[in-house]
Amino acid sequence: MKSWHLIVDVARCHDCNDCFLADKDEFVDNEFPPYSAAQPWHGHRWMNIKRKERGQYPIVQTAYLPMPCMHCDEAPCLTADGAVYKRPDGLVIIDPVKAKGRKEIVASCPYSAIYWNEEKELAQKCTGCAHLLDDGWTETRCSQVCPTEAIKLVLAEEDDVERMVEDEGLERYRDSLGTKPRVYYKNLHRWEKAFVGCSVVYGDTDECAEGAAVTVLRDGSVAGHGTTDIFGEVAVDFLTPGREYVVRIEADGYKPVELTVQVDASLNAGTVVLEKA
Ligand code: SF4
Ligand code: SF4
């Protein structure tokens, strides 16, 4: 049977907040029984966009992680009495009647995707726009509005999703939690991995060293490599944070330089001056 999945491309998200606002437009002050009660004006982020700065000036990037409810297949938020339940199409719904007064539901989500509505005494979250999909929609409000197509809603058989995960290098965020999210991410390295960058200069001419080879090593094995650009800058990505790396910089006619850096998060290792060999 086909079921719903969301594919989010971290590299395409530029934090415009259109998805966040579309969610607000749909759910604030609007009730959709039996799917959801109205979202309050303040305090809820059913589509929560997490933000991160990578590196330091001038080698710096931003990364954004749009994070709705993951509609997990092994969801710890599910309750035996149906206050939180999973539909056959994969969506996880909090029943706005049965869940009333059940504040403990908020803490059951390891992704912090559930919010407490004080006025209604109700735990609430993203419904996957189930009321629209049941009405024939093929988009959620967030996927429909995203200007960069960073969010895609997919209705597919599990086998096809597995193939898509393999072909497109999709990953689950914090997969080790074991909840089997239905939200998959592309380019998740921008959130979970780190880069080490530097600016390289030729000492004899004071010019930017374009085309220098930069190799990042971990315990003698190559962990990544790159080539400096026209500004002499490079950022070698996909490194695992919390480790020590050696950065080797080489250019024809110049002495190689090696730096040892502790990469706890993306790092600009500064300016490296190459001396003539
Ligand atoms: S609408 Fe798209 S680009 Fe804008 S914040 Fe949401 S996911 Fe990112
Ligand atoms: S992300 Fe949280 S609220 Fe959503 S299904 Fe998973 S455990 Fe439940």
Image (tube, rainbow, N blue to C red):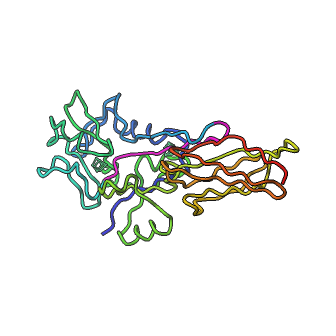
Tell me the quarter of the picture where residue 120 sits: top left
* Nearer the observer, 158 or 252: 252
Q: Is residue 62 magenta?
A: yes
The stretch drawn in magenta includes residue 171? no
Q: In the drawing, does residue 256 fall left or right of residue 165?
A: right
Above or below 51: residue 135: below
Image quadrant occupied by the N terminus = bottom left
Specify start and end residues of the magenta stretch as a single range: 57-71
Residue at image location 45% in from the left, 50% down from the top = 143
Left or right: residue 83 compared with residue 172: left
Whole-percent x, y for residue 240 in the image: 50, 53
Picture quadrant where residue 153 is located: bottom left
Question: Residue at the left extreme?
Answer: 81
Q: Nearer the viewer, residue 198 or 16?
A: 198
Residue 145 or 214: which is nearer the viewer?
A: 214
Q: Where is residue 74 in the image (x, y as percent from the top left)?
A: 25, 57
Residue drawn at the location 25% of the way across and 38% of the way down = 37
x then y, percent, for residue 274: 79, 48
Q: Which residue is drawn at 41% across and 60% down?
A: 154
